[in-house]
Amino acid sequence: MDKTNSIATNNIQNVESERNRKAVIRIKNVCKSFGNNHVLNGFNMDLYEGENVVVMGKSGSGKSVMIKCLVGLVWPDSGYIEVMGKEISTLDRQTLDELRSDIGFLFQGSALYDSMTVRENLEFPLRRHQKKLGNLSDTSTLVLEALENVGLGHTMDLMPTELSGGMKRRVALARTLILKPKIILYDEPTSGLDPITAKEIIELMRSIQKKYGTSSIIITHDVDCARVISERMILLVDGINYAEGSYAQLSASIDPKVEAFFKK
Amino acid sequence: MTKSIKQFFIQIGDLSYFAGRFFKEVFSLPFEFRELLRQCYQMGVRSLFLVGLTGFIIGLVLTLQSRPTLIEFGAVSWMPNMVGISIVREIGPVITALICAGRIASGIGAELGSMRVTEQIDAMEVSGTNPFKYLVVTRILATTLMLPLLVVFGDLIALYGSALVENIKGDVSFQLYFNTVFDALNWGDLIPATIKSFFFGFVIGLVGCYKGYNSTKGTAGVGIAANTAVVMASLFLFIVDFIAVFVTDIFYEL
């Protein structure tokens, strides 16, 4: 971290009270490059139980790469990642798959399987995690419950192409919830949505967090989303956590790089 | 020039690794039977019309084109033997495989490519399902199993097309035509052609999946994956065909 970055980080108070909670994710000095493009240059963060952390940064700053490292979709070049007490890089395929059932991932473009109906999309994750949810003889109840949680109980037999962008995002959220994860990773949950639908998605995320007590990392460019949902924010610049604090603290910052994110 | 040669060998290396992964995963649990059956239906049943129509036209054209020459030499009675052997040994498998390379390899390349760029493959991985096993292994198995059946179907329709011409132009009954064809054929014609068809199916599935699964560069990459899958699969089909004919020839000499 260069001098400017350290000053910026030090200028913004960290939320020390969070440190008393149990960390469900620990990231230390993670580096990742794609050829000559150094995306992450020693990124650090902790996520505590029941906490919502928003990670903001410019496009291409490595936010999505960072959360993909948490579920083993991308492997970092160096650094340490621990999720729920398990170091990701040391896990075999089976243990990693078991751990993944505790982590929900909402993809930026929803990533619904377009050759399957909504019901089949939701049933798909259940195929591999029967142990976790016990008897799955009646998956319809679970599917219906998950869909009703997002207000789309009536869409069970529709194909993803028949859904609007907002509905797709909600179905994707329902698919994420069906395994009752302890951590949810949101990759730009409101991108590409109109402001009203975006607000509905944000409300949904809040209600899910309240209902299930999940911990979340939310990657977003949407300042309104960050304001409503974040307990803590991290600003990712040049592959490092440039600044960290609550929304109020960061939005009041006079650091030009931080200020740039909050300018209307 | 040097760069493209290097790129070619890198791709061959990647493809070999991809094939190695297929052989590693095909025997490991769990088996995706439902998806395999679905793919067999998609690739087998849905290709029947195209393969049948092509086979019929090939049989028809081959007979119509050969007739004048055979008449000139007074050898028109050899027509069923000539057409039968050439269709079963070479034309049937190669034409069917090329049709399938166009239909199936491009379809797989586009489908998997689109799943890759829309993060559906990542979503599968995160949900604890091995996408390679679910998407790639099932598709390669389906093409490997279905192509020999499509070849047999295509051969029969092509022979029917040929018999039709002979029936109309030469007054040869269908029974006589097919009896002559089956008398002319022996196991040495059928077995290498069938084995070759399994390899053709494997190559089509492998190249289609490889191109689609490793697709990059967004939606443009999907088009590239579909296009290069057809080109590469067709090229490999001829290479496999050459090797198969070469090996068969060695056995004939023995």
Image (cartoon, rainbow, N blue to C red):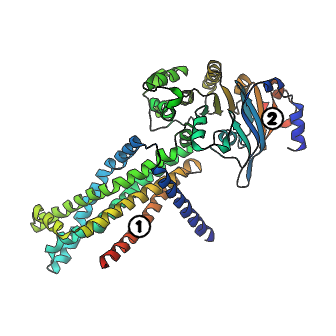
Disc nearest the viewer among 1 and 2:
1
Q: Is residue A70 left or right of residue A17?
A: left
Q: Amino acid at mark 1?
A: Val
Circle 1 marks a residue in which chain?
Answer: B
Q: Is residue A5 left or right of residue A166?
A: right
Residue B86: tell me if it is visible: no
Q: Nearer the viewer, residue A208 or A136?
A: A136
**Mark 2 neighbour class, 10 Å CA radius: few under 14, some 14 to 19, many 20 or more:** few
Measure how far apart labels 1 and 2 are at the Cα level: 60 Å
- The residue lying at 39 percent from left, 43 percent from top is B33
Give the position of the C terminus of chain B as an image quadrant: bottom left
Q: Is residue B244 left or right of residue B207?
A: left
The spot of residue A94 in percent (x, y) is 56, 41
- The residue lying at 73 percent from left, 55 percent from top is A36
Q: Is residue A247 above or below residue B78?
A: above
Q: Quadrant of residue A199?
A: top right
Circle 2 SS class? helix
Q: Nearer the viewer, residue A136 or A183?
A: A136
Residue A184: tell me if it is visible: yes
- The residue lying at 44 percent from left, 53 percent from top is B106
Q: Decide: marks 1, 2 in contact (CB < 8 A)?
A: no
Q: Amino acid at mark 2?
A: Ala
The spot of residue B158 in percent (x, y) is 24, 61
Q: Which mark is residue A260?
A: 2
Which residue carries the number 1 mark?
Answer: B240
The spot of residue B165 in percent (x, y) is 16, 64
Circle 1 SS class? helix
